[in-house]
Amino acid sequence: MAKTLLIHLRSGSMMNMDSNVTVKLARAALSKGYNVRIFGYGEGITVIKAGQEPKRFPNVGKELEELVQKGLVVVVCETCCAARGIHRGEEVNGTKIGSLTNHLSQFVAESDKMVTLAR
Amino acid sequence: MPSILFVMLKSPHENVNLELVDDLGKNSKKAALLFEDAVYYAVDKKNGKHLYEHVDEIYVMEDDLAARGFKSHAAGKFQSIDYDQAVDLIMEKYDRTVTI
C-alpha cells in the first residue's frame, strides 16, 4: 500500500510562496505514487476559494483542481473559512470545507509523514 | 539513530531560531531542507556556515535558487535538489520533518 504524505498549509494563497511549494510537493509526491492530502488552516484555507485570478502569479486554485483529478485530497478548516467569509459552494471543484477535529485528526492518524508550511 | 529533516522557509535575515534545531534534534541525525528565501543560506557564507554548525546535511531547492538569480550557486556542503528528491527525503530518508 502506498505511503501517505500530509501537507499542513497555514499560509494564504497570496501571502508568500508557501502555497506554491505545497502544490509542487503534492505534484511530485503524486507522480511518485504516494497518496497526498492537504489540510488548510488559518490563512491556508484561502487556497480553495474558487475564482482566483492572479495576474502574474501561479493560480493555486486551478493547480489544486488539476491535482484533485489525479487523486489529491484537499480539505480546509470550516471555522477558519467562516471567519473569512468563505462558505460551502465557493470551493474549487473537488476540494472540501471540513473540520479540524474530524479531518485533520483523521489525516494525521492515517499519514506516514507530515510537512507543515507556515510562518 | 532517529533522523529529523528541518524544513526552513525564511531568510537568514528574518527571525530564525536555530537553537530549536539543537533542542529538538538531540541525539538525532539532523538535516535542513531549504525552500523559498531560506535558500539565501546557500549564498551567504557567514549564515551558511552558522547553519552548518547545527545540522549534518543541508539540501537546497534548485528552483528557488534559480528564481532568485542564484542558479547553480549551491556549493560545498549545500546539495542542490529538485522536488522529486525533496519528496524522497521527506517520505523515505528521514523519520520526521519539523518546520522552523
Image: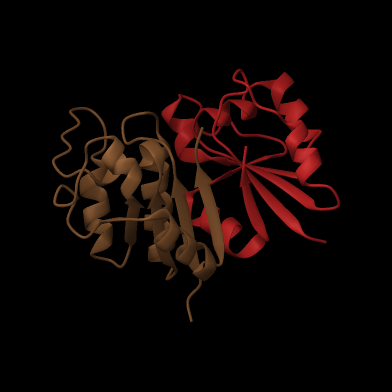
Residue at the spot 65% in from the left edge and 61% down from the top edge: B93
Measuring from the top left, give residue A64's x and y in whole percent.
Answer: 27, 52
Q: Nearer the viewer, residue A46 or B45?
A: A46
Measuring from the top left, give residue B36's x and y in whole percent.
Answer: 49, 32
Q: In which quadrant of the rendered view does residue B56 lie?
A: top right
Q: Is residue B73 left or right of residue A45?
A: right
The chain shown in brown is which?
A
In the figure, the shade used to draw chain B is: red
Residue at the spot 70% in from the left edge and 46% down from the top edge: B31
Residue at the spot 21% in from the left edge and 43% down from the top edge: A49
B37 in relation to A90, above or below: above
Q: Nearer the viewer, residue B64 or B30?
A: B30
- Which part of the image, by quadrant, shows the N terminus of chain B? bottom right
Q: Nearer the viewer, residue B43 or A80?
A: A80
Measuring from the top left, give residue B50's x and y in whole percent.
Answer: 77, 26
B96 in relation to A18, above or below: below
Measuring from the top left, give residue A28's x and y in whole percent.
Answer: 41, 57
For the question of whether residue A15 can be seen, the reply is: yes
